[in-house]
Amino acid sequence: MRNENWMDNSSVRQRLTAALTEASASGKALANFMLANISSLPFETSRSVADKVGVSELTVGRFCRSIGYDGLKDLKERLKDDISDSPWLIGDRLRDLQQKSSTDAALARSLELAVASVVRVYEHAHTEAWNRAAKRIAEADRVFVAGFQTERGLAEAFVHMLRYLRDEVQLVDIAGGNFAEVLLTDPAGCTLVLIDARRYSRQSQLLAAKAAERGMPITIVTDLYCDWAASYGDEVFAVPTDLNLFWDATSGMWTLMQLLLNSVFAHRGPSVEERLNSVASLYESFVGYSRGPK
């Protein structure tokens, strides 16, 4: 039976956002997936959603009823008001690429999904959570960044670029096996940026749980399917990674992190230019650029 406790004027986005903290584990996973994939949700079915999230079709229907809809079909009907603005305003070069890809259905679908992933990243950048995370990363006394498995490379690149903007940025040591630098430091003035995608590292969830337990703010960059991120993250930025390719693609996650660096730069203010020049000068002294001074 449909849950009648919801206000009639609450939007689909509002109900899904509330479910991130109020629903069961499977409900949180469904809410996370629907929010992150909301532009293409009208084209999904109960079965396709169930397969992508890893739950049953009955669970999808039960979740929709728990947030006040008769089922997924009813939710999608109400969703029309939420996504009236179309993200598919593309230039001539993209149209040309679409036409070239039209003879290869798999490639054409991958292109659509890649564009949708970028759109989702820029949607994140217009939220209060985004501004809050960027401001904290810009102003915290210390910033820890952790990534595991293939996402370790994203973490390393983010740390490298963030150090151009500020000091006290540390890539979390995963070889020591204890994360003491994060968990034994005073959490006041510190923040943790955690990057992970399926199949998720056990260490990633444990680190998030322990850091949250100590009261350290956490920003999590992940994919659409992570059902534990909302339990620990002060901000969770979920990005589509299923681009119809052999491997899940984390390119959208890196696009998000580059955009986040841009926002951190804006929060740092004019003084950041001096640090950028200083770091570049040090690099020139120790390594050198291809057209640097002889």
Image (cartoon, rainbow, N blue to C red):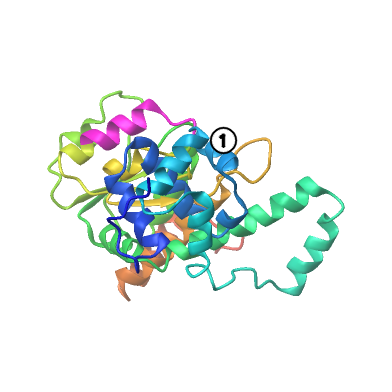
Identify the residue at image location x=34%, y=65%.
Answer: 10
Was residue 206 drawn as part of the magenta stretch in this picture? yes
Question: In front here: 122 or 183?
Answer: 122
| 16 in relation to 78, above or below | above
Question: In front here: 92 or 147?
Answer: 92
What is the secondary structure assignment of the residue under circle 1? helix
Q: Quadrant of the C terminus?
A: bottom right
* Residue 246 relative to residue 8: left or right: right
Was residue 119 drawn as part of the magenta stretch in this picture? no
Question: In front here: 103 or 55?
Answer: 55
| Predominant SS of the magenta segment | helix
Identify the residue at image location x=30%, y=64%.
Answer: 7
Q: Which residue is tagged 1? A: 51
> Residue 28: x percent and y percent?
37, 43
Name the kind of residue labelled 1 in the image: Asp
> Residue 31: x percent and y percent?
41, 48
Q: Is residue 287 visible?
A: no
| 63 in relation to 87, above or below | above
Quarter of the image holding residue 177?
top left
Quarter of the image holding residue 185?
top left
As drawn, which residue projects farthest toward the right? Answer: 103
Q: Quadrant of the N terminus?
A: top left
Callout 1: 10 Å neighbours few (<14), some, many (20+)?
few
Identify the residue at image location x=72%, y=51%.
Answer: 109
> Residue 123: x percent and y percent?
47, 64
Q: Is residue 12 visible?
A: yes
> Residue 189: x percent and y percent?
16, 53
Which stretch did the figure color magenta?
A: 198-210
